[in-house]
Image: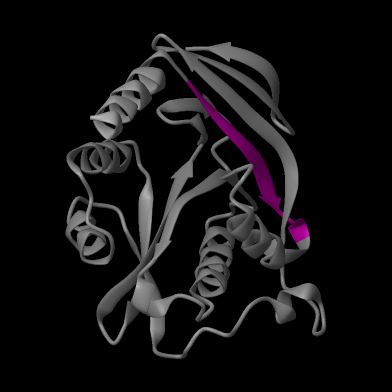
Amino acid sequence: MKTRLRQSLARLKSRVISRDLQDIYLLNDRFMSDHLPGSPATQVSKPVQAHVNFQIHDNADVLELIDQINPMDEQARAFASNRLSKGDQAVIGYDHGLPVFYGWLMFGEIEMTYGVFMQVPTDIAFGYNLFTASSHRRRGLMSGFYKFVRNDLKSRNIHTLYVGIATRNHASIKAHLKNGFEKNGYFYTIKLLGTSFTLARFEHAKRFYVN
């Protein structure tokens, strides 16, 4: 009975008030260009095994691949389908043809909090929802993903890449710092009775949003 009551109270609290505190990180310019031998870019994490390769997907077929890595619930699938219709792309990492990693990219927009987006110039990319299969963690797949993404974005004349990371996600922060990201600002959101109040402070915005 007590457990059920606590769960009910938690659900009520999440509907009445919740918060999403994210810092925004920018991939340093030197990592978006060719780095010199001995630079920090040559020292990040463990090298990706040669048989892991990455491919870009931009249609609904990718959802089945993602389900093989990390099964989505109905809400996550609807969100992913909607983002594909907006032009987002999913990057899948394959090990001998088996999908083991995914990461998403959006262009000309940044997600400040769940479902709240801010327009930015179209030559800016935003990375989100990275996930590695449990069987392939600690193998440097994140480093491989960002190496692939850097090269792909440069080929499209996109030289700015941001990510948003929860302030308490210390493991992700550490991994991104090792891969050349630097803190550039923050998005702090409080949701009260269905209304989101977001304070955005970073290079491209210093505003207070109500959604």
Asked where in the image residue 172 lies, by quadrant, the reply is bottom right
Whether 22 is drawn above or below 209: the answer is below
Whether 171 is drawn above or below 142: the answer is above
Q: Is residue 22 left or right of residue 36?
A: left
Which of the colour schemes (rainbow, by chain, secondary structure, one colour) is used?
A: one colour
Q: Indicate the position of residue 155 as horizontal and vertical percent values.
A: 54, 63
Q: Within the magenta stretch, is there residue 166?
A: no
Asked where in the image residue 78 lies, by quadrant, the reply is top left
Q: Indicate the position of residue 35 as horizontal and vertical percent values.
A: 76, 74
Magenta stretch, overall SS = strand
Q: Within the magenta stretch, is there residue 25?
A: yes
**Magenta residues, as a range?**
18-29
Residue positioned most to the bottom: 50
Q: Is residue 199 left or right of residue 17?
A: right
Q: Nearer the viewer, residue 126 or 24?
A: 24
Q: At 68% across and 76% down in the image, what residue appears? A: 44
Q: Nearer the viewer, residue 85 or 144?
A: 144
Q: Nearer the viewer, residue 2 or 79?
A: 2
Whether 100 is drawn above or below 15: the answer is below
Q: Indicate the position of residue 133 as horizontal and vertical percent values.
A: 35, 70
Residue positioned most to the front: 1
Q: Nearer the viewer, residue 97 or 129?
A: 129
Q: Is residue 150 left or right of residue 86?
A: right
Quadrant placement of the N terminus: top left
Q: At 17% across and 59% down in the image, what residue appears? A: 64
Q: Indicate the position of residue 65 as horizontal and vertical percent values.
A: 22, 64
Q: At 34% across and 28% down in the image, what residue appears? A: 6
Q: How many marks?
A: 0
